[in-house]
Amino acid sequence: MNPIYRDMPTTIFEAMSMRARASGAINLGQGFPDGPRNDAVIQAACEALQHRSNQYPPMVGLPELRTAVSDWYRRHQQLDLDSDEVVVTSGATEAIAAALFALITPGDEVLLFQPLYDAYLPLVQRAGGMARLVDLDPSSWRIDAQALAAAVTPRTRIVVLNDPMNPMATCAHPDDLAMVASLCTDNDLIAICDEVWEALVYDGARHRSLMQYPGMRERTVKIGSAGKIFGLTGWKVGWMCAAPPIARVLAKAHQFLTFTTPPNLQWAVAEGLDSQDAWIAMACDHHQASRDFFCAGLREIGLATVPSAATYFVSVDLTASGIVMDDAAFCHAIIDQAKVAAIPISAFYAEAPPTHLVRFCFAKDRATLATALDRLAEALAGLASVPSRG
Ligand code: GLN
């Protein structure tokens, strides 16, 4: 058995969702939305299931979807991607795996920022890469220039950037993007950019891809997700975009991971990207309003929130809320006592985690959020007496 898998825990998202299902808790842990529902895209998938092919589509994706992705990025992010530069994957997680497997030669060093999405590190290790962890500044979640420079060695080949960032719900500062771009061009690095939250950026801000920065067009792998854009996380339709010499190698890794992605879902996503700009903007406003409702509610019951500029998530600062418990103990306690599931931020660290932050998913119906807030309020008084489980 491979020790990477033998010794790793089940991903925190599945672990907390399992606990939530078992105890009937409201699941504000794993990030998936209650709505809004895009009926046009779902109907297009039904039509395609009934009336179009159910056989293997082309390995790199249906031409309709590859073209729709490149058009969508041209309209929304001023990127000049050709459809040949898009490889469709079974979700962004597969794209991340394919990119790391394709681009890492065993022994290469890979820069990862902490907090990090939990899939990155085991996939880097499985590809034979040596991860170099760079902590973001926990007061702002910005990149510390010195820490970044200190992590680069002659063996560094890749930097992985998640922007907007899960879990802390920040958008990368333009100066930080420029810094990463210079780092890549100065050291001949490839950037793997997990931008699955690009359509869920709030307060009028616009997503800007690292790929737009000088020198980055030829050395960036940009990863996106229809699951996030249309709120259909179970569909597992994603993609990776890169200049042809990189895209060709990415496709080789993809062909022996999943080979293809269900064609019906690909057609539906293509139609959605072509026709649903207004719905995508509406969904973004909808989630922003849910964020505002939930954050106001958290503050009312005495929980201090960390600013959330994007994603489905907001974090609570336990220390600032006067709660003397670590994040994991708090999450166990609120599942048991409030029947509300959340995610401890320490799960997003491979080493030296902060233990005072807990992530909640606000992409839920108002009534569900309101019930969760009521239950948390009721349970909070008792929580101080629960011993830490470490
Ligand atoms: N991206 C989701 C989250 O952060 C989890 C996805 C998964 O469970 N693989 O909650």
Image (cartoon, rainbow, N blue to C red):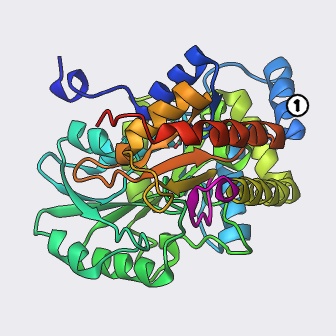
Which residue is pictured at 62% across the width and 70% down the height? 207
How far across and down, in percent of the image, does residue 351 sit? 22, 50
Does 368 sit above or below residue 145? above
Which residue is pictured at 70% across the width and 57% down the height? 300
How far across and down, in percent of the image, does residue 377 sit? 66, 43
Tell whether 219 sits left or right of 122.
right
Q: Is residue 360 magenta?
A: no
Q: Is residue 238 visible?
A: yes
How far across and down, in percent of the image, does residue 68 sit? 72, 53
Would you call the spot at circle 1 few (<14 residues within 10 Å), some (14-19), or many (20 or more)? few
Ligand 1 within 8 Å, label 1 CB: no
Does 334 sit above or below residue 349? above
Tell whether 254 sits left or right of 31.
left
- Residue under label 1, please give it: 43
Amino acid, disc 1: Gln
Which residue is pictured at 30% across the width and 77% down the height? 144
Which residue occupies the foreground of this view, 297 or 111? 297
Which residue occupies the foreground of this view, 260 or 200? 200
Q: Which residues are magenta?
A: 298-311
Which residue occupies the foreground of this view, 238 or 206? 206
Q: Quadrant of residue 132?
A: bottom left
Tell whether 320 sits left or right of 239.
left
Q: Is residue 302 magenta?
A: yes
Task: Give the quarter of the figure containing the N terminus.
Answer: top left
As helix, strand or loop, the secondary structure at mark 1 comes to: helix
Which residue is pictured at 26% across the width and 47% down the height? 350
Which residue occupies the foreground of this view, 361 or 243? 361
Does 358 sit above or below residue 304? above
Q: Is residue 60 visible?
A: no
Does 318 sit above or below residue 63? below
How far across and down, in percent of the image, does residue 188 sit? 25, 72
